[in-house]
Image: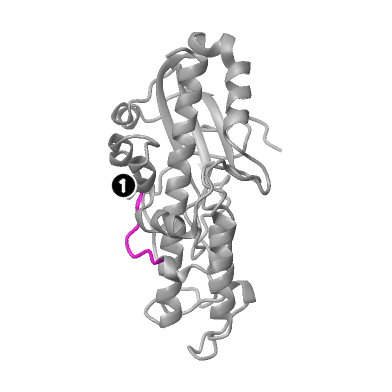
Amino acid sequence: GLNSPLEGLGYSGMLWDEIISKRLVNFNDYVYDFTVEHPHHNFITNNFVVSNCGVRLMRTNLTLPDVKDKLRHLLAALFNNIPCGLGSTSSLKLPFHELKQVLKKGAKWAVERGYGSAEDLERTEDYGRMEGADPEKVSQRALKRGKNQLGTLGSGNHFLEIDLVEEIYLPQVAEVFGIARNQIVVTIHCGSRGLGYQVCDDHLARMRHVVDKYHISLPDRQLSCAPLTSPEGEDYFAGMAAAANYAWTNRQIIMHWTREVFQRVLNL
């Protein structure tokens, strides 16, 4: 166990730090992560592709006294307006042709339909859209899993939190992002839901059948892969890019609904 809190996240066991250098080690074997010489280091995974499971931070101009007496109302309203949990579905029911537009356009699709503003896109990595996405590389099964899940959190480690900024570790960076002590912020962690999971599952199954063709030896079947320039690799990238665009859209919609909850409950 931890005998003292670590800088960063208290007793959680996580540490904020910077990688300032790296060096090549002569090691003739499989390597799945970087070796970081720190007593509390666990790992940074290498070669694991995730379909844009990410965290979005929402700034506010509020402090704790502004929300303290309304926290219960805020939480209840968030639960009522943003579906969460295993198999959760959204009030948005998209036909397949519209869902394919989501996979192409990403968060821009949401903004065009009133879920947020152009300013949101300017403050989103890659403007909330990944190039190279091809909805035709997403299976019908994946589309079915994703058509009713836009604007949902899901389960596992996905979350929506109302947070209070207690400490600033990099003042210059915080200033650029407009973050200050005692500020209320909201963090949203979610990804591409069942659609992204199915995209990955479909393409891993396909690549599992071609590893011999590309003379790839696998220590584990779950590490199935193909050269990026191969037909299988290109299709996988195009499908995962589409899933990434779904994830950006998902977080954009959740953020918009969260804004509406704050405005309504706090009379902003």
- Is 80 displayed left or right of 22 in the figure? right
Residue drawn at (37%, 79%) of the image: 229
Amino acid at circle 1: Tyr
Residue 131 magenta-highlighted? yes
Foreground of the two, 171 or 93: 93
Residue at image coords 39%, 56%: 101
Most foreground residue, 146 or 162: 146
Residue 195 at x, y percent in the picture: 55, 58
By secondary structure, the bulk of the magenta-drawn segment is best described as loop
In the image, which residues are magenta? 127-134
- Look at the image and tell me whether residue 201 can be seen: yes
Q: Which residue is mark 1?
A: 127
Image side of residue 201 versus residue 55, left or right: right
- Image spot of residue 268 (x, y percent): 42, 14
Q: Is residue 221 left or right of residue 245?
A: right
Q: Is residue 183 above or below residue 11?
A: above
